[in-house]
Image (spheres, coloured by chain):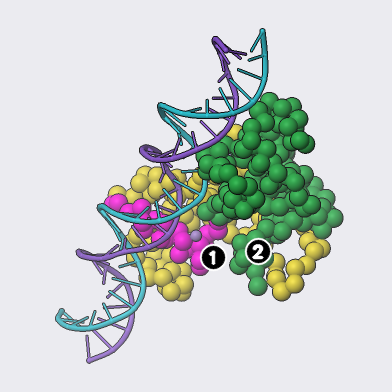
Chain colours: A yellow, B green, C purple, D cyan
Amino acid sequence: MKYIDKLRNSGLRPTKQRLQICEVLFNTEKTFHFTINELEQKIKNKIDNKISLATVYNTVHAFEKKGYLKQIPINSNQTYFDTNVTDHHHFYDLKDQKLIDLENSDVGPINIKKKINGKRIKSVEVLVKLED
Amino acid sequence: MKYIDKLRNSGLRPTKQRLQICEVLFNTEKTFHFTINELEQKIKNKIDNKISLATVYNTVHAFEKKGYLKQIPINSNQTYFDTNVTDHHHFYDLKDQKLIDLENSDVGPINIKKKINGKRIKSVEVLVKLED
DNA sequence: CACTTATTTAGAACCATTATAAACTAGAAG
DNA sequence: CTTCTAGTTTATAATGGTTCTAAATAAGTG
Ligand SMILES: [Mn+2]
Ligand SMILES: [Mn+2]
Ligand SMILES: [Zn+2]
Ligand SMILES: [Zn+2]
């Protein structure tokens, strides 16, 4: 099983639930964006047994901490996550409430000239809001 | 009173509560960022009477709709607002959970090359996360 | 003043997320 | 295999920011 080592190497026990969530999250052609609710639905459609909502939250947060997922800063009543953990930017379609990845070549390098004493830059993210 | 016309011209009745909230939000040297809770505290410190929490929410949303405030996309359990409604970017200090304005000259122009059919760009915002 | 409509308000409701604590399980040691 | 322990899952309750409700109040109009 291809996710067992990934989990073990991260110090996470490869439980049935985590492996199944890995299948839903990472066994795909393309990366994607999701809310916890959307992930719950995907899980329901893909597997037979039930995974409790608490476990879905726990697992998503564990994966986020290990760097397998990242949160996307957006104003929504639900938190958005991304299976694309590389540094990249987003379109946000305000009407459809859908996120679309931007390639770095679609934006170009961003050089932050200002420095804050004692702080390091952890990430630089561009959010482009779209309207009709 | 300097905010009466502003409100009337926006189709908002210049009530005592709205005028007092205007004083707290706009009668300052610098623009600033705030959550609803922080705004409530500022109001308590600055005025004698009480303004109900519902009115604070109502007013902030009314001002946002009229373009006097804007929401900042950030992952937090509370919504952040900005009295600086010009297009600008932010540092976000992850430890202190504080927002800091970036001047446009600190970032430089951002040219989005990708187009989405039938959609127009409404805003382009950069969020720079800072860690120690 | 009389009337209409907007606004304020306290409190309830909502709902995504987090906390709890008991049952279960993976991995290690014997 | 058996035992032991720390990690994990789970149902359910609690939390807390935000929104809703509906009654009281205030603003604007004539
Ligand atoms: Mn998280
Ligand atoms: Mn709003
Ligand atoms: Zn993405
Ligand atoms: Zn700002």
Location of mark 2 (residue): B93
Residue D26 picture location, percent across and down:
59, 28
User: Which quadrant would residue B19 be assigned to in this image?
Assistant: top right
Of labels 1 and 2, the one closer to you? 2
Task: Work out whether A22 lies above or below A35.
Answer: below
User: Which residue: 47% across, 54% down?
Assistant: A25
Q: Is mark 2 within 8 Å of ligand 4?
A: no
Q: Which residues are magenta?
A: A49-72
Q: Calculate the distance from the C-alpha at mark 1 to the C-alpha at mark 2.
A: 20 Å
Q: Position of residue C10 (x, y in %)?
A: 43, 40
**Chain for disc number 2:** B
Choose between B6 and A128: the one closer to the eye: B6
Q: Secondary structure at mark 2?
A: strand
Q: Position of residue A91 (x, y in %)?
A: 66, 44
Assess whether residue A115 is covered by the magenta stretch: no
Query: Are the two marked residues, 1 and 2, in contact with CB atoms closer than 8 angstroms?
Result: no
Q: Amino acid at mark 1?
A: Gly
Judge by depth and name the residue closer to the eye, A39 or C8: C8
For label 1, the SS is loop
Within-10-Å neighbours for mark 2: few <14, some 14–19, many 20+: many
Q: Along the horizontal axis of the image, is B2 left or right of A94? A: right
Instruction: Identify the residue position indicated by label 1 in the image.
Output: A67
Q: Which image quarter: residue C4?
A: top right
Q: Residue at 65%, 50% (x, y): give it.
A: B46
Location of the N terminus of chain B (image quadrant): top right
Residue at 82% x, 52% y is B104
Residue B97 drawn at (x, y percent)? 61, 62
